[in-house]
Image (cartoon, grey):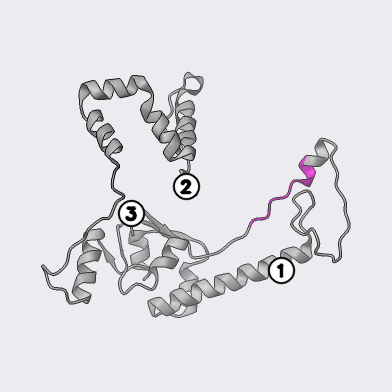
């Protein structure tokens, strides 16, 4: 586990032979929740009201212009409860503990890596090298019988040219004036260009110094 491996991150980790984490890793969050947004009161303030008919009482149950029906809420809650039982049950099986023991440290609570180790959710402190060495020992590969190779998409000849050009002072200045990097970024990742623009605007907003900006670089 790196900086963050909580909820779904812990779900992925839980069946490992050994879980390594940093003392400051954010982990745990063993739980499940659902959220159904509705805004009928907001619409009411501007004079907008909705109505309709359906074949059953659950027709249009997720219409955000209407309040959530209690019956629908009960069904959703039952699905969430089942998901939570499945999550805690699988963690209990993977960690060799009872469901009650896992429930006592679950319920959506978040732990640091140090706290998680105290509660039996993590086995050892260590980084990626430690985890790789452990995996090699378990596979009986020996000290020198294994290695790690990171596979990355190779650059095109043009991308190599631009990268080499950017490495020189004159080339970097020329690229900055030409707007070519922004064009390449927009073509390669249109959403990322918008994200970077948001951060730039946040930093420049109102002339006030920005100490921290939280933004999700979510790629599809």
Of tags 3 and 1, the one toward the viewer is: 1
- Which is in the foreground here, disc 2 or disc 1? 2
Which one is in front, 135 or 188?
A: 188
Residue positioned 43% across, 24% down in the render: 209
Left or right of 57? Residue 4 is left
N-term mark: 3 or 1: 3
Q: Looking at the image, is mark 2 or mark 3 earlier in the sequence?
A: 3
Image coordinates of residue 47 in percent, x first then y, are 85, 37
Identify the residue shown where x is 19% and y is 73%: 137
Q: Main secondary structure of the magenta part?
A: loop
In the image, residue 175 lies in the stretch drawn in magenta: no
| Label 1: element kind | helix
The alpha-carbon separation of the residues under discs 3 and 1 comes to 38 Å
Along the line of sight, the residue nearer the viewer: 164 or 202: 164
Q: Position of residue 28 (x, y in %)?
A: 43, 62
Element under label 3?
Answer: loop
Closer to viewer: mark 2 or mark 3: 2
Relative to 209, 144 lies left or right: left
Q: Residue at x 27, y 66 (%)?
A: 124
Q: Secondary structure at mark 2?
A: loop
Q: Where does label 1 land, which residue?
A: 75
What segment carries the magenta color?
Answer: 35-42
Give the residue number, with chain letter if any, for mark 3: 24
Is the C-beta separation of discs 2 and 3 under 8 Å?
A: no
Q: CA–CA distance between discs 2 and 1?
A: 32 Å
- The mark nearer the N terminus, 2 or 1, is 1
CA distance separating discs 2 and 3: 26 Å
Instruction: Let me know if residue 40 is in the magenta part.
Output: yes
Residue named by callout 2: 219
Q: Residue 96: x and y, percent? A: 39, 80
Q: Residue 39: x percent and y percent?
A: 74, 46
């Amino acid at each position: 586990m790196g900086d963050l491996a909580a909820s779904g991150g812990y779900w992925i980790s839980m069946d490992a032979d050994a879980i390594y984490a940093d003392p400051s890793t954010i982990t745990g969050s063993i739980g499940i929740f659902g959220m159904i947004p509705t805004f009928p009161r907001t619409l009411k303030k501007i004079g907008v009201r909705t109505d309709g008919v359906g074949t059953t009482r659950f027709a249009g149950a997720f219409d955000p212009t209407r309040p959530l029906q209690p019956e629908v809420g009960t069904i959703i809650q039952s699905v969430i409860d089942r998901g939570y039982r499945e999550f805690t049950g699988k963690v209990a099986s993977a960690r060799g503990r009872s469901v009650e023991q896992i429930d006592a440290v679950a319920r959506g609570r978040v732990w640091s890596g140090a706290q998680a180790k105290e509660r039996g959710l993590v086995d050892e402190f260590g980084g990626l090298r430690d985890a790789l060495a452990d995996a090699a020992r378990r596979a009986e590969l020996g000290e020198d019988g294994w290695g790690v190779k990171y596979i990355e998409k190779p650059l095109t000849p043009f991308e190599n040219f631009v990268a080499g050009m950017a490495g020189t002072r004159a080339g970097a200045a020329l690229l900055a004036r030409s707007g070519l990097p922004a064009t390449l970024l927009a073509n390669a990742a249109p959403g990322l260009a918008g994200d970077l623009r948001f951060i730039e605007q946040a930093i420049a907003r109102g002339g006030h110094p920005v100490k921290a900006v939280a933004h999700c670089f979510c790629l599809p």
